[in-house]
Amino acid sequence: MQRILILGAGFAGLWSALGAARRRDELGIDPARLEILVIDQNPWHSIRVRNYESELEQTRIPLTEVLDPVGVKHLAGLVTDIDVLKREVAYQAGDQGHLLTYDRVVIALGSHLFRPAIPGLRTCGFDVDTYEAGCRLNQHVADLPKGPSGPGQYTAVVVGGGLTGIEAATELVSKLKQARGSAPVTAETPPVRVVLIDRNAWIGSDMGDSARPVIAEALQALGIETRVEASLTAVEADAAIVDGERIPARTVVWCAGMRANPLTEDIPVPRDRLGRLPVDPFMRVPGVPAVFAAGDAAWLPIDGTHLSVMSCQHGRPMGRFAGNNVVSDLVGQPMLPLSIDWYTTILDLGAWGAVYTEGWDRVVVTKGAEAKRTKEIINRERIYPPRSGNRREILDAAAPVVQKPPPVFGNLRTSS
């Protein structure tokens, strides 16, 4: 029996597994002859991009629900080592270490939040990098009324003015208001305050000239304070220290910077500044036989020019093509190159709405409530795998094709 290992069950890993199952089925290969096995430390797939939201109950999907119907095996374990010479993967399950050999492997171990050695950040800070972290933050905010009243009780400092930081900050306004409203409010009750800081000269510096004024409009409307060209220097239980200024705050959320899983270091190729592995359009790691990679652990010129980004927008199709191609490569069939000729960014802006941009220069096409409709379709429908348990439906969803851009409501360019 031959074996394809898929390392990780995030967006790229899940869709690699489903893409491989589809290709195996398409070629009529008996699963008894070709095993597809997913290894992830969790027994579920996480809709990670929703971890900043208030309600997280629907963001975890049991792997049994999606993989079992298409004959993909899975086990819960933490991958600890990848040996490309021996074609072995080591993983830890409970107190036991295990080894698995492979004929082909797809590295889809994703990314993690980069946390610098800022005093107090690990002990007093929060983040939204994982489901557990998002739940911890939400519970902390809900419990704020139980703490002693005083300066900073309902103040949150969010560090990082990129997409995740902006989404976390705008959502925190509603979370804090809800928490404060659940307790008796007097004239002495501390106000709701959200401060968003970033080292760059602009909040949303990567969003470009078209989107930045929209982001600024939303932040102002929500009452969010901003500090630019500023750095967090320490975190205390009741304060954030920003360039020497002490801001009373019971909640400090770190959203600055992502890095690929460090196990990419096991692969003998140069990695980019984010620790990602280079891949060709077939998702192969050049110069390393039998190794494919996808999602946040990999990069390629996604349209021949622009590099893929760490997002489900690219992770999901990278996974579908990696899964298709890893089976095709194993059995000597033609592979399919991935190229995506469109790029969109839909940024959630809390109760204000959202902003929808098109292209790598991120030109605004719609904003406010209309853009929010698109964002909700993406977060709650588009990026989910089929949950019907229907084998055919699941396999069809894993076809190696590039989806059309998400819908646009109230297009500003056509209505003006």
Image (cartoon, rainbow, N blue to C red):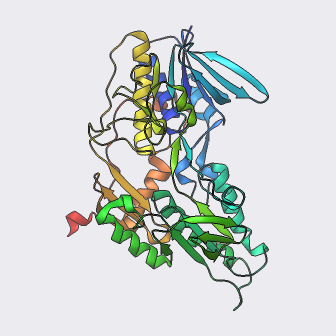
Image point (69%, 92%), residue name: 187
Name the residue nearer the viewer: 411 or 176. 176
Q: Is residue 159 left or right of residue 213?
A: right
Name the residue nearer the viewer: 263 or 194. 263
Q: In what quadrant of the picture does the N terminus appear?
A: top right
**Percent x, y of residue 14:** 52, 33
- Residue 75 vertical placement versus 201 (above, below): above
Q: In what quadrant of the picture does the C terminus appear?
A: bottom left
Name the residue nearer the viewer: 344 or 278. 278
**Percent x, y of residue 232:** 57, 65
Q: Quadrant of residue 88?
A: top right
Residue 45 appears anywhere in the view: yes
Image point (28%, 45%), residue name: 342
Residue 73 appears anywhere in the view: no
Residue furthest front in the image: 244
- Residue 303 vertical placement versus 335 (above, below): below
Q: Quadrant of residue 143?
A: bottom right
